Image: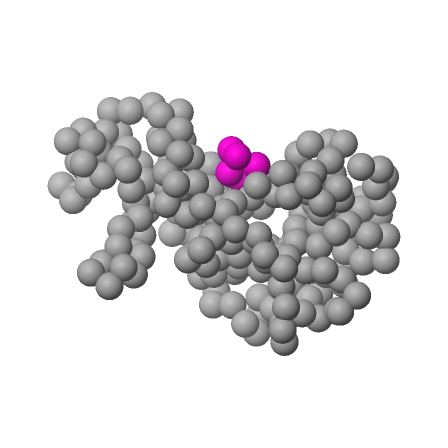
Amino acid sequence: MDFYAGIENFNRIRSNIIFELVNLKLNAASLADCVYDEVYDLAKVYIILTFDKDDLPAVTRISKAVLSSWQIEMSDLRAVASLNTERLLPSRIELLSGMFKRNSDIDIYICSNPRQYLGASVMLYESRPLQTFAKNKKMNLLIIPCSIHELLVVEAKDYIGIEKLRDVMREFNEKTNKRSEVLSSNIYRYMQKNRDIEMMASYESMFRTYSV
């Protein structure tokens, strides 16, 4: 029997259940027996987050068999994970500076959490930190999914080409990220008038309108 199976174990570890975002295609094989939701080109995977004696994090993906043994609905799992993820990994958005800032004319923000661990999950937080950030800054956003641990965010401007950003992301994924940490080579955007994050299909789709 799995170490986490059974309703007693669910009650024991329910405060450690969170979710992470991973690349759906790259993780297809390893996700076959796991509990997840498809979101855009990503998988929202339900996991158990624990910490060792040195406060280093470790995750265990929740299998379909374990979920069944807990005798709870998928909606209950989603609710528990949503609450815990924001509690254990609160969002943080900061202005990026130093050697990694490619263009001094563009403000680049890094979106993650204080641990900089599984920080891409903030894109799906119910508290909507990216949307709140956009509202406070009075701007629309381009969201660049660097890795499972962080997102880069820039203001949506006509002179920032989506294809160029995609090329940068592909290069970053190929040369910098571990394969297991690659999130996406696609770019997302948030436009205040639409009030939702969407994956961008093409360069032209950036420029429907930028009225805030």
Residue at (52, 34) in percent of width and height: 127
Q: Residue 110: tell me if it is visible.
A: yes
Considering the image in quadrants, where does the C terminus appear? top right
Q: Is residue 156 left or right of residue 93?
A: right
Furthest-front residue in this view? 136
Considering the image in quadrants, where does the N terminus appear? top left
Q: Is residue 209 left or right of residue 79?
A: right
The x, y position of residue 148, in whole percent, is 49, 55
Q: Magenta stretch? A: 124-128
Residue 19, image quadrant: top left
Q: Residue 171: tell me if it is visible.
A: no
Q: How many marks?
A: 0
Q: Is residue 56 left or right of residue 37?
A: left
Q: Is residue 143 left or right of residue 7?
A: right
Residue at (57, 66) in percent of width and height: 173
The x, y position of residue 111, in whole percent, is 56, 53
Q: Main secondary structure of the magenta part?
A: loop
Look at the picture and state if 21 lies above or below 14. below
Magenta stretch: residue 127 in it? yes
The x, y position of residue 179, in whole percent, is 48, 65
Residue at (75, 41) in percent of width and height: 138
